Image (tube, rainbow, N blue to C red):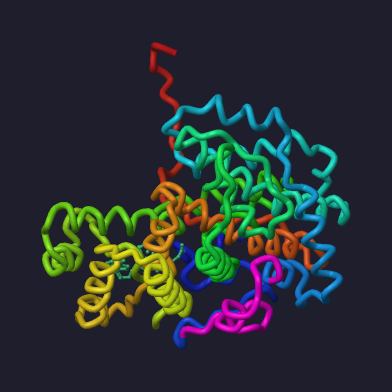
């Protein structure tokens, strides 16, 4: 018809109906399938939350057993895929390694690419949940030049992941239970957030009936940007830069307010939350717990706390309803756990995976939506004609 409304950045337009996650941004409420995030973060496990998001209900004990067994069964990577890592340069960013290797999975599992076959969708779901943490750990090991370990399926999901990252072939490894608990909680907090940029990407790519591996790989790429999941890495870089330059919190905040060189307070602000992000509250608690338990006194935590206080009491941030988001304190915890800064967004990706899978399945299941195909308002040239006398063509 030629008529279309303009909503750049999708500020007002719902792209879909969804029954997975509820957010009330004005009141700082987040629920997965109806369950408050605070209850899930303190009582549940990451794989139970994954089950809840993907299938809609908490599992019975036997369903949970079956689900976790199936994931354990699929943790190995094909040996040829392991060689893929050696083809990449040693300085390769682990997020690029992750998105590339996840897309490469589709070449190994052509048997499970049929998006119209529910059994194959299920198979791909389990394979992705099982193999992405292993790929992530190998991206880490690759970046520090250490040998890859085989998954240890006697361990649960989080301990296995920690061992793959921090274990080595020479010594036995046992995860510190404080770290396991904190990581479990962080993964739960990241598990879904309705139609954020990466999830919308997964749904859009999925709407073309592209396979699940490619759709999730696209989601990982969207997550990588510093305005989205890449913010956790950007926060740590910002804190380190403030510390190293010695410029001080007040001067840095002034630069943010004056929008000098486009500098932003990373880890602050959110499209949906116009009050304190409920996840950020829980993350801050974990940061205090983990650092206390490890006996770590990280000056960056003190710096972050100061920045938060200055910002929360400043009119610039108050007028714009800018509060700390989930990414503000996570990096300090990941750092204390021993992860390099470049792994932070990879950890976010592992957490967000169940959400991406749940949304892909919702969008391609019974409530299958049309292919996503936004309209545009054309602002280019009116019709013009190719010159008769251009000569050189
Ligand atoms: N620091 C300084 N000013 C900010 C910030 C910030 N972090 N966030 C927003 N503003 C200002 C912005 O300049 C604008 O001011 P004005 O009206 O004077 O132009 C106003 O607040 C509204 O901002 P916006 O950019 O229109 O808001 P948005 O909804 O488009 O962007 C956001 C949301 C998350 C991209 C943005 O707040 C931001 O860039 N934050 C920093 C990056 C970050 O922490 N991202 C993680 C988001 S949460 C988890 C995730 O998705 O991964």
Tell which quarter ligand 1 is in: bottom left
Asked whether, in this view, residue 3 is left or right of residue 267, the answer is: right
Residue drawn at (73%, 67%) of the image: 54
Q: Is residue 273 depicted above or below 179 in this figure? A: below
**Closer to us: 380 or 353:** 353
**Closer to us: 299 or 25:** 299
**Residue 4 in sight here:** no
**Residue 44 in sight here:** yes
Q: Is residue 115 depicted above or below 312 in this figure? A: above
Where is residue 338 drawn, in percent x and y? Answer: 43, 53
Residue 56 in magenta? no
* Residue at the far top in the pictured view: 392
The magenta stretch is 28-48
In the rendered image, the quadrant that contains the N terminus is bottom right
Where is residue 223 drawn, in percent x and y? Answer: 50, 54
Quarter-wise, where is residue 79 in the image?
Answer: top right
Where is residue 284 drawn, in percent x and y? Answer: 40, 74
């Amino acid at each position: 018809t030629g008529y279309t409304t303009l909503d750049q950045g999708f500020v007002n337009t719902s792209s879909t109906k969804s029954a997975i996650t509820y957010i009330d941004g004005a009141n700082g409420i987040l629920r997965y399938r109806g369950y408050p995030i605070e209850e899930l973060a303190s009582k549940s496990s990451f794989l139970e939350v994954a089950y809840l998001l993907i299938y809609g209900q908490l599992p019975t004990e036997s369903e949970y057993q079956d689900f976790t067994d199936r994931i354990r069964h699929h943790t190995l990577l094909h040996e040829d895929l392991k060689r893929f890592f050696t083809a990449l340069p040693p300085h390769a960013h682990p997020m690029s390694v992750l998105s590339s290797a996840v897309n490469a999975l589709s070449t190994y599992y052509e048997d499970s690419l049929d998006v119209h076959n529910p059994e194959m969708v299920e198979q791909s779901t389990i394979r992705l949940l099982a193999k992405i943490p292993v790929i992530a750990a190998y991206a880490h090991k690759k970046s520090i030049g250490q040998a890859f370990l085989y998954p240890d399926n006697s361990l649960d999901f989080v301990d296995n992941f920690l061992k793959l990252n921090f274990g080595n072939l020479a010594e036995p490894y046992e995860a510190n239970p404080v770290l396991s608990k904190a990581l479990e909680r962080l993964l739960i907090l990241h598990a879904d957030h309705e139609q954020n940029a990466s999830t919308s990407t997964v749904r859009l790519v999925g709407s073309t009936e592209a396979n699940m591996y490619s759709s999730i790989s696209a989601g990982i790429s969207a997550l990588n940007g510093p305005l989205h999941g890449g913010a956790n890495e950007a926060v740590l870089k910002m804190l380190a830069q403030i510390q190293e330059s010695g410029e001080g919190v007040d001067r840095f905040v002034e630069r943010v307010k004056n929008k000098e060189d486009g500098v932003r307070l990373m880890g602050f602000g959110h499209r949906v939350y116009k009050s304190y992000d409920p996840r950020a509250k829980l993350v801050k608690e974990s940061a205090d717990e983990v650092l206390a338990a490890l006996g770590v006194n990280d000056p960056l935590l003190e710096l972050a706390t100061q920045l938060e206080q200055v910002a929360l009491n400043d009119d610039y941030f108050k007028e714009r309803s800018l509060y700390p988001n989930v990414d503000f304190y996570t990096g300090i915890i990941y750092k204390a756990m021993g992860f390099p800064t470049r792994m932070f967004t990879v950890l976010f990706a592992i957490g967000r995976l169940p959400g991406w899978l749940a949304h892909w399945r919702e969008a391609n299941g019974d409530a299958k939506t049309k292919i996503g195909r936004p309209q545009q308002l054309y602002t280019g040239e009116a019709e013009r004609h190719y010159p008769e006398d251009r000569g050189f063509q």
